Image: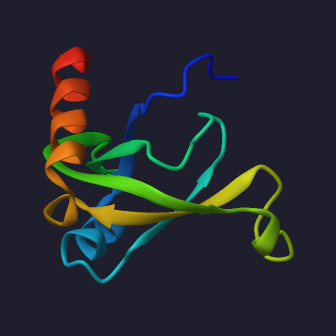
Amino acid sequence: MRETEFPVLHCLKTVAPFYNLVKERTKRDEIRKNDRDFRVGDFLELQEFIPEGKKFTGKRIYTKITKILAEELKFCLKQDFVMLCLKFKEEFSQDEIDQLNKLTEQAE
């Protein structure tokens, strides 16, 4: 359980075909195991991953969680999984950009 209410930056491995759909802005959600205490307002750094070579490409996309669906989808999601609804970086307000910049600086 998280002790702070401030947003967190979650760095997530994202397999290339799904990464490309997010990059093209045709995929606005992520289904993930909720093992990171995701919260609305948190940021995601989706890192492109090639499973065949077991390597990261270095490509990243930043998004923000706008809604989390779990109970509504319990009939079709595995236990402890959630759907994260996403907002893309180009849709961020200046305050959201500032928050993300602060979080990425702290992560380095």
Residue 96 appears left or right of 72? left
Q: Considering the image in quadrants, where does the N terminus appear?
A: top right
> What is the total number of numbered labels drawn onto the structure image?
0
Q: Is residue 90 above or below residue 107?
A: below
Which residue corresponds to the image point at 24% horizontal and 35% vertical from the top-left?
Answer: 99
Q: Considering the image in quadrants, where does the C terminus appear?
A: top left
Residue 44 in picture, x, y percent from top left: 36, 45
Judging from the image, the colouring scheme is rainbow
Q: Is residue 56 above or below residue 78?
A: above
Residue 57 in picture, x, y percent from top left: 15, 46
* Nearer to me, 9 or 91: 91
Residue 17 appears left or right of 58? right
Residue 69 appears left or right of 66? right
Q: Quadrant of residue 25?
A: bottom left
Which residue corresponds to the image point at 57% horizontal and 42% vertical from the top-left?
Answer: 38
Residue 61 in picture, x, y percent from top left: 21, 53
Q: Quadrant of residue 11?
A: top left
Which residue corresponds to the image point at 31% horizontal and 70% vertical from the top-left?
Answer: 17
Q: Quadrant of residue 75?
A: bottom right
